[in-house]
Amino acid sequence: MTFGLLMILEDVIRFIWGPAPLTATSVYASLGSIPIGDGRYPTYNLVIIGVGIVAAVFLWAFIYKTRFGVLLRATSQDKRMASALGVNVNLIFIEAFTLGCFMAGLGGAIVVPSQSAVLGMGVDALVLAFIVVVIGGLGSLEGALAGALIVGVVREFFVTMYPEVELAVLYLIAAFVLLVRPAGLFGRA
């Protein structure tokens, strides 16, 4: 359903604004780069890392330290029991979807200055998100973090060293995890 919605929204965007890519590279360029070892590293990438860490801590605190987080976890574990205890399950799902949309929007907004916003870029993110969930395990915030770190490190290594097999290696890792632990590294059966 998510993929179908993505395709519909991309066509709506193409109809309204056209297919031309949009850029915000002035932000990326204005921050410059810093020397690391023999090379230079873009300062904006450090901003992305910082925003990612802040977002991860916020999400963890929101899910594990708030009343909403308790209700969300209860609803995801046993929808019928949560409903029987008086939890408005539909409202919890809507709020969780809204939080997910906010996090996706934040991710898109923080990435656009380092690359162009083009139609179809969501498909790449969806594929990587799928691999992260398969590796980390469905319904596990810790698994999502571990999966994202594994995918990020492996992807960067292979993009740098062997770009032609980068995506294939990620699929192989996901397949290996499914063979060893079908629920993912941190998933629960």
Image (tube, rainbow, N blue to C red):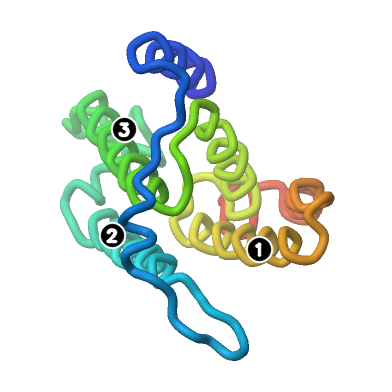
Q: Is residue 101 visible?
A: yes
* Image depth: mark 3 or mark 1 in front: 1
Label 1 belongs to which residue?
A: 156
Q: Nearer the viewer, residue 127 or 143?
A: 127
Which residue does the image show at 58% across and 58% down from the upper left? 147
Q: Is residue 92 above or below residue 179?
A: above
Residue 17: image location, x then y, percent: 35, 17
Identify residue type, mark 1: Glu
- What secondary structure is found at the residue carrying circle 2? helix
Label 2 belongs to which residue?
A: 64
Which residue does the image show at 26% across and 34% down from the upper left? 98
Which corner quadrant of the image does residue 58 belong to? bottom left
Which corner quadrant of the image does residue 130 belong to? top right
Which residue does the image show at 71% across and 67% down from the upper left? 157
Which residue does the image show at 83% across and 51% down from the upper left? 165
- What secondary structure is found at the residue carrying circle 3? helix
Compute the Cα span from label 3 to label 2: 17 Å
Compute the Cα span from label 3 to label 1: 30 Å
> Is there CB contact under 8 Å for labels 2 and 1?
no
Left or right relative to 178: residue 99: left
* Image depth: mark 2 or mark 1 in front: 1
Q: Is residue 12 above or below residue 138?
A: above
Residue 122: image location, x then y, percent: 50, 33
Q: In the rendered structure, which disc, 3 or 2, sits on the residue that comes first in sequence? A: 2
Label 3 belongs to which residue?
A: 97
Identify residue type, mark 3: Phe
Q: Is residue 35 above or below residue 84?
A: below
Q: Nearer the viewer, residue 22 or 81?
A: 22
- What secondary structure is found at the residue carrying circle 1? helix
Residue 7's mark?
none
Q: Nearer the viewer, residue 68 or 168?
A: 168
